[in-house]
Amino acid sequence: MKKDFLNISDLSKDEILQVIDYAVKLKKDKFQDQTLKGKSIGLIFMKPSTRTRLSFEVGVYQMGGQPLYITGSSTQLSRGEDIKDTARVMARYLDGVVIRTYSHNEIEQFAEYFDKPVINALTDYLHPCQILADLQTIYEKFGKLEGIKVAFVGDGNNVANTWLIAGGVVGFDVSVATPPEYEPSGKAVFEAVKHAEKTGAKINITNDPVEAVKNADVIYTDVWVSMGQEGEREKKEKFSGFQINKQLLNYASKDAIVMHCLPAHKGEEISEDIFEEFADVIFDEAENRLHSQKALMSFLFK
């Protein structure tokens, strides 16, 4: 039976740890896994991308496969073809699909009619490939995931949603601080809490960044205005006090690291001095998109 990766919870805790462990190994020898030899993987991008597109194109190539970059405007989807029809046609040509789009419902519908693995490269609801790379980075820095506290400060967006679910599944504490009215999705919180009941993770939603960051091992942020929300620039005024800076880091664990999924708007969600202080971590995190996604594709296609 085919296995998709639309949500971080599509993998069990043991499977996530298995993928991360393999990603660390793949980092040492980029051509050692040839699982995709002879396979063609469609990369469907409805949104602009730097890290996601490059990491998947290079990753598929390094694993012996053929990446096919497909923009939404270059398909009949742009002319109103049903998603399920596009999925059934592509299933006749492709061995797997990576999709970066807006609506999470669209990727779920595509996966229902595409009979091979589908990978969520970002939707407005979730960004599981990013968090998989982040988990690899945390594992490399701390040697573990359990017992870690992650504090997300900023907009309760797709990245925040995925962090909550990941904490619940794997079993580490996650505290998300956002301004009022910008909290994470209630659906994501509900799923995170449900998983946390089994793993013992603590899930916390607050409007106080100090509360979230207190004793945290990882402080994480993302842009305040996500792709597709550029018309909401006035909302930045509501994020005063939610910047990752030296003052806020005083409340974190003394060995805490700062992470950012990029691109960064320095001077907004993160001060430039803190970004540069933790630049090595942030760009390791970006590099790990390649390795963790290769490990994921190896898992899905074997």
Image (tube, rainbow, N blue to C red):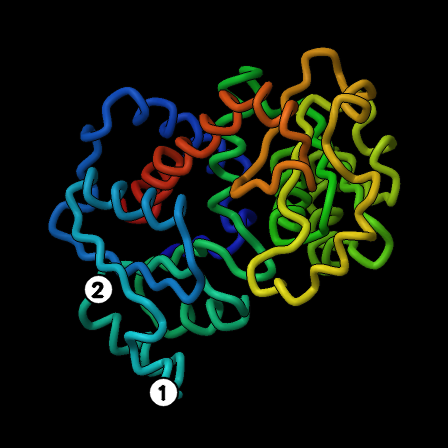
Q: Kindly identify the residue that appears in the image at 79 percent across and 40 percent down.
A: 242
Residue at left offset 78%, top offset 35%? 202
Identify the residue shown where x is 81% and y is 23%: 247
Figure check: 10 above or below 133: below
The amino acid pointed to by label 1 is Arg
Q: In this figure, which residue is indicated by the disc labeled 1?
A: 79
Q: Which residue is drawn at 81% across and 33% down?
A: 212
Q: Which of marks 1 and 2 is in front?
A: 1
Asked which secondary structure carries label 2, the reply is loop
CA distance separating discs 1 and 2: 21 Å
Q: Where is residue 12 in the image (x, y as percent from the top left)?
A: 53, 42
What residue does disc 2 label?
Answer: 94
Closest to the observer: 257 or 137? 257
Image location (x, y in percent) of residue 127: 53, 51
Q: Is mark 1 on a helix, strand or loop?
A: helix
Is 81 placed left or right of 268 in the picture?
Answer: left
In which quarter of the view is residue 180 placed? bottom right
